[in-house]
Amino acid sequence: MSSVNGENWSSRIDSLIVGPKAQGLAFRQENFKEDQTGLTYHGDAIKSWGGDAKGYADTEVTFVANQKEHHLGELNFHQNIRSLKIRCLP
């Protein structure tokens, strides 16, 4: 995500639409990592605002064909995607 058409899109994605013949897997970390190392976790701040920090430590989220997410905050991934895999379906 750091160099898409010459721009850095890391941590800039607010919404997502998946096409009818695709699936997506988004990661909080660069290079498609799935471990907790290096994550930015703001659980204390979320709790202090009265929110539930559960789910904010998730490292990845899957998107299915035709899925539309108007705001990734609902999945706790607002501006928190640093790498993305796209799979074409038959």
Image (spheres, helix red, strand yellow):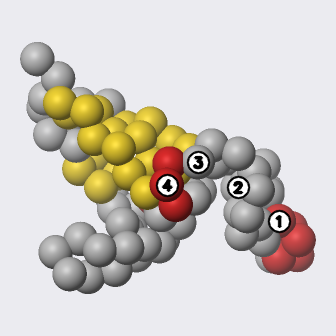
- Cβ–Cβ below 8 Å for labels 3 and 1? no
Crowding at dot 2, Cα within 10 Å, few <14 / some 14-19 / many 20+, comes out as some
36 on left or right of 5: right
Residue at the image position 17 percent from the left and 30 percent from the top: 88
- Cβ–Cβ below 8 Å for labels 4 and 3? yes
User: Where is residue 76 drawn, in percent x and y?
Assistant: 59, 56
Q: Which amino acid does label 3 sit on?
A: Lys
Q: What residue type is labelled 1?
A: Gly
- Measure how far apart labels 1 and 4 are at the Cα level: 24 Å
Q: Which amino acid does label 2 sit on?
A: Tyr
Q: Mark 1 points at which residue?
A: 43
Q: Name the residue under label 2.
A: 56
- Measure how far apart labels 4 and 3 are at the Cα level: 6 Å
Residue at the image position 43 percent from the left and 57 percent from the top: 83
- Cβ–Cβ below 8 Å for labels 4 and 2? no
Q: Mark 4 points at which residue?
A: 31
Mark 4 lies on a secondary structure that is helix
Residue 33's label in the rendered image is 3
- Measure how far apart labels 1 and 2 are at the Cα level: 7 Å
- Cβ–Cβ below 8 Å for labels 1 and 2? yes
Residue 78's label in the rendered image is none
Q: Which amino acid does label 4 sit on?
A: Asn
Question: N-terminal of the two: label 1 or label 2?
Answer: 1
| Foreground residue among 22 and 74 | 22
Question: N-terminal of the two: label 3 or label 2?
Answer: 3
